[in-house]
Image (cartoon, helix red, strand yellow):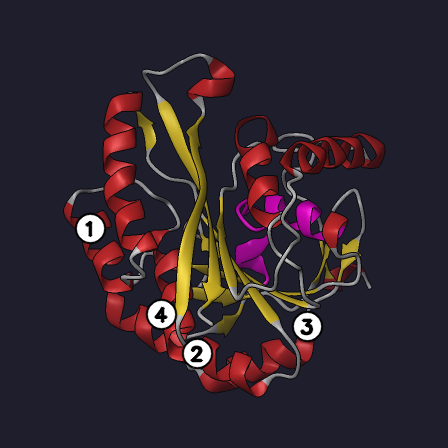
Amino acid sequence: MSENIRFPAVAGQFYPGEAGQLRRTLADFFLAAKTDTRPRPAPAVMCPHAGYIYSGALAAATLAQVEIPKRVILVGPTHHGLAAPAALSLATWRTPLADTPADTAFAESLLAKSPFIAHDEAGHRREHCLEVQLPFLQYLRADALIAPLLVSAIPFQLCQEIARALAAAIRAAAGETLIVASTDMSHYLPRRQATQLDGLALERVLALAPAGLHETCVKYRISMCGFIAVTIAMLALLELGQVTAKLVGYTDSGVASGDIERVVGYAGVVFQEEK
């Protein structure tokens, strides 16, 4: 039924709106990202969510390193302020490539584990940060199920509460789970300043220091839009066990636009279980 479909909000804007063109674009990205290393299971990644012309190559390079499991939790920031503080979708999400259903059993388990997470479809309708991740996942794993979660600018204590619920739901679920934490880095700064500030935030990410990331972004007013989502993802990972973090790459919008006076930064990180 149409009311159970989350229709694309930014197809034709952030990424190609025609299925054939979108598939060719993704194929080119993944061909360029191909390495001798085989994809490995991973509990989480941090991926950019800008228009594909700016950050699509880095998003593909990040996800290409990961063996995509059946269940993917998408966590990202609300840019419109229209969602609940932690808004979960149970809809089937549509892109020009395909429809991807929600993992409703997992979503209901997550809702039951925290009073701070709400079922909120309306908050997702206009938001781009999770939608732009989906075609990459559909290309790599056609039968994936998703749990899309938007988070607002919430305090660290609430990040801890949500992360504990997320970790508990992952622990209780059968099979592997991948968290995709969706974020861009600094926004509309000269390249030198953006690189410096993003370096401070990425130090905290690579050190697996969620409290440090939250504190650093607040203290230095780093406009990393999804730092709350990444904080929650890291907190959940640390609840579940020992992990390491590897930077796949860092770039900015000036590479595509030529404008280095007002760039948006992008980073890709893969988190791996420590053996």
Say above or below: 36 vs 5.
above
Q: Secondary structure at mark 2?
A: helix
Residue 229 coordinates in the image, percent (x, y): 41, 58
Q: CA distance from mark 3 to mark 2?
A: 20 Å
Q: Magenta stretch: give its range.
A: 121-138
Magenta span: chief secondary structure: helix
Residue 31 visible in the current orientation = yes
Give the label, 3 or 1, closer to the camera: 1
Say above or below: 225 vs 75.
above
Which kind of residue does numbered mark 4 sit on?
Leu
- Which quadrant of the structure image shows residue 221? top left
Dot 1 or dot 4, earlier in sequence = 1
Q: CA distance from mark 2 to mark 1?
A: 24 Å
- 167 part of magenta stretch: no
Residue 155 visible in the current orientation = no
- Which quadrant of the structure image shows residue 79? top left
Residue denoted by label 1:
216
Dot 2, crowdedness within 10 Å: few (<14), some or many (≥20)? some
Residue denoted by label 4:
235
Residue denoted by label 3:
103
Which kind of residue does numbered mark 2 sit on?
Leu
Is 227 placed left or right of 67 in the picture? Answer: left
**Front in this rendered view, residue 31 or 131:** 31
The numbered mark at residue 240 is 2
Dot 3 or dot 2, earlier in sequence = 3
Q: Secondary structure at mark 3?
A: loop
